[in-house]
């Protein structure tokens, strides 16, 4: 087995599992307070919105425009967003099929928020894992700084997944397992994609996947995370936290 392949596996795995760092940040406060959860969810909302608007959608638009000329590329992007919305509605129905009960069970509701976030983050990592794995394999000279940058960007994702589950159940192990599971999607997707999907993994498929993921992340943010932040915190806390989450993503670019 080539050294480049083993190096790619190692670095992508480390980058993916950096979500664990985000989980431990959530575990730091000794007391679980609803105000803290509202603040953390607000930051999560800001992070997700900024990732979608600043990174995923522009990248998807660029990839699709390299494959098709305007307006075809834009129509494909919009169509993919609607596909993501449809998938969001289906996922929402599957996870909230006991709505009447959940209205009286905040713990159940918050668990669903965390599980949905884990699923969304995992979906986001499918095309990302393949692209990162191939990039590291093809140019190992820039592998370490590239993997470090990816790892730093995944820390807030661990916070997004862990916070609702931990505050709902008080179970650090459960929150950590979901965070690890979400992080492991990156190396698994990278390896499987490299072995089986590299011939068909192109700008078109990556652009469509990124657009679908963006739509699902938008839905989760506005349908679940922001309302939950308002519920456990207040308007001022939520607005302040969302702005902090957006600022946080921009600060990560300086590293």
Image: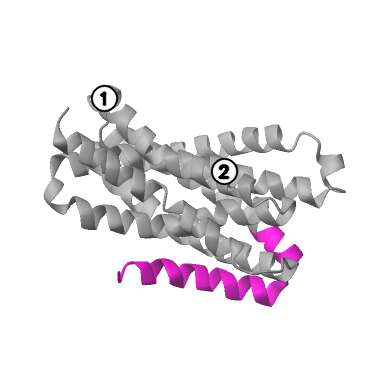
Q: Is residue 209 visible?
A: yes
Up/down of 64 relative to 53, above or below:
above
- In this rendering, would 147 be left or right of 35? left
- 252 in magenta: yes
The residue under the point 81% across, 36% down is 98
* CA neighbours of label 1 inside 10 A, class few (<14), some (14 to 19), many (20+): few
The residue under the point 35% across, 48% down is 14
- In this rendering, would 64 be left or right of 154? left
- Mark 1, residue position: 195
- In this rendering, would 195 be left or right of 37? left
Report, in whole angstroms, how far the alpha carbon at label 2 lies from the one at label 1: 26 Å
> What range is drawn magenta here?
226-255
Q: Is residue 71 visible?
A: no
Up/down of 235 relative to 178, above or below:
below
SS at circle 2: helix
- Mark 2, residue position: 178
The residue under the point 76% across, 33% down is 97
Depth order, front residue of 77/178: 178
- Compare marks 2 and 1 and give the one earlier in the sequence: 2
Q: Position of residue 144 (x, y in %)?
A: 22, 54
* CA neighbours of label 2 inside 10 A, class few (<14), some (14 to 19), many (20+): many
């Amino acid at each position: 087995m080539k050294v480049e392949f083993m190096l790619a596996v190692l670095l992508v795995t480390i980058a993916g599992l950096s979500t664990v760092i985000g989980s431990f940040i959530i575990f730091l406060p000794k007391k679980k307070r609803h105000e803290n959860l509202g603040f953390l969810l607000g930051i999560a909302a800001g992070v997700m919105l900024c990732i979608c608007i600043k990174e995923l959608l522009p990248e998807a638009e660029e990839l699709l425009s390299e494959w098709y000329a305007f307006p075809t590329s834009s129509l494909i992007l919009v169509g993919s967003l609607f596909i993501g919305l449809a998938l969001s509605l289906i996922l929402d129905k599957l996870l909230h099929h006991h709505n009447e009960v959940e209205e009286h069970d905040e713990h159940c509701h918050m668990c669903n928020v965390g599980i949905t976030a884990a699923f969304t983050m995992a979906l986001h990592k499918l095309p990302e894992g393949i692209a990162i794995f191939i990039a590291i394999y093809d140019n190992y000279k820039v592998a370490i700084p590239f993997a470090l940058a990816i790892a730093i960007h995944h820390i807030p994702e661990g916070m997004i997944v862990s916070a609702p589950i931990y505050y709902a159940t008080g179970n650090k192990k459960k929150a950590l397992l979901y965070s690890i599971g979400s992080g492991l999607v990156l190396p698994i997707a990278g390896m499987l994609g490299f072995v089986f999907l590299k011939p068909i993994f192109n700008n078109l498929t990556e652009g469509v996947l990124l657009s679908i993921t963006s739509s699902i992340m938008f839905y989760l943010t506005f349908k679940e995370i922001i309302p939950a932040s308002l519920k456990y915190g207040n308007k001022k806390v939520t607005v302040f936290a969302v702005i902090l989450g957006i600022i946080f993503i921009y600060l990560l670019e300086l590293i």
